[in-house]
Amino acid sequence: MNKPDTSSAPTPSAPPGRRRLVKRHSLPVRITHWVNVLCLSILLLSGLQIFNAHPRLYWGQYGADADRAFIAIGARQLGDTSRGYIQIGPLGIETTGFLGVSSEDGAAAARAFPTWLTLPSYHDLGAGRHWHFFFAWLLVINGLVYLAHGLWCGHLRRDLLPTRAQLSLRHLWREVIDHARLRFARGEAARRYNALQKLAYLTVVGGAIPLMVLTGLAMSPGLNAVFPFLPDLFGGRPSARTLHFLTASFLVLFVIVHVAMVVASGLWNNLRSMISGRYAIDETGDKP
């Protein structure tokens, strides 16, 4: 996630038509960003390995094979052929070749998510849990470091909180139209987040990731013994598992949109700013 750091001293203006490099991201922001990338990648792959052990999601206090699933991914045998499907409530979608049934060593195999999307690639629930738990705690520690830095340096207040003017419906609608037309901020305006970026990042940092962590804790039998109220916060462990899966899916969607916007608005410039901290802006207002 691109988190600009505008706390640095102003850079002298460059002659018209010239580019200049400005400081956009502090070192702690860059480090925590890349640690997040690593953690979320491993958590996704290992989480799908765990999900494959029981690819059904329930809502309520109980959930077992005989109970009606809220979401299910599986395979049905039709004669000599297995057909993959995903069931969401009353809606059923055939997904043969990817979800439910995928190709392994040239043969069709019943498996919720294919081997190339899980860690480890072969069926090993224990290894998947070890990977998942280790990087989950690393994500928590990394998040606390980011929050501490953001509060101490004013990054959260200065860069992520939208102004009243930015929250007006007229302003938000204009930004939606600009994004749909791939019109991005230029010149000095590119140093700051727009309202849609701020709202998206606040949703992830303040909502999605904390919810994913809490629902993960609510599924832990060991932590449930120490904090028995945790599952009840979400209506039971099956509901916590469903919310955990849906929140992870939301984060995957966020990352896809985020990467698409990074590429569309200038891949190398954005990568440079998240590696070296420096971002190129054009004094004429042309696209960097």
Image (spheres, rainbow, N blue to C red):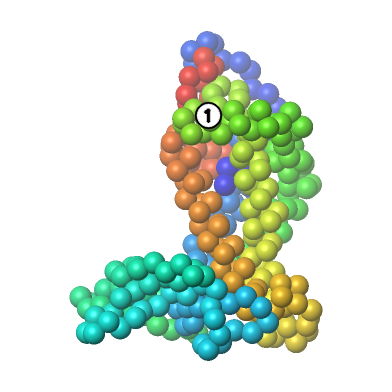
Residue nearer the viewer, 231 or 274: 231
Q: Residue at x 55, y 27 (%)?
A: 185
Q: Is residue 281 visible?
A: yes
For mark 1, does the 10 Å Cα neighbourhood hold few (<14), some (14 to 19), or many (20 or more) residues?
few
Q: Which residue is mark 1?
A: 178
Image spot of residue 57 (x, y percent):
55, 76
Query: Which residue is nearer to you in this view: 129 or 151?
Result: 129
In the displayed structure, 126 sits above or below 32; it is below
Query: As rendered, which of 189 and 23 lies closer to the eye?
Result: 189
Label 1, secondary structure: give it: helix
Task: Report the front residue among 134 and 43.
Answer: 43
Name the outermost residue toward the top: 16
**Residue 129: percent from the left, percent from the top?**
53, 79
Q: Quadrant of residue 268?
A: top left
At x 52%, y 70%, the residue is: 89
Which residue corresponds to the image point at 64% horizontal and 65% vertical from the top-left? 212
Residue 134 x/y as whole percent: 58, 73
Residue at coordinates 53% horizontally, 78% vertically from top-left? 69
Residue 113: image quadrant is bottom left
Q: Is residue 263 above or below residue 108?
A: above
The amino acid type, in three-letter code, at marker 1 is: Asp
Q: Residue 271: x and y, percent?
A: 48, 41
14 horizontally vs 219: left or right: left
Residue 155 appearing in the image: no
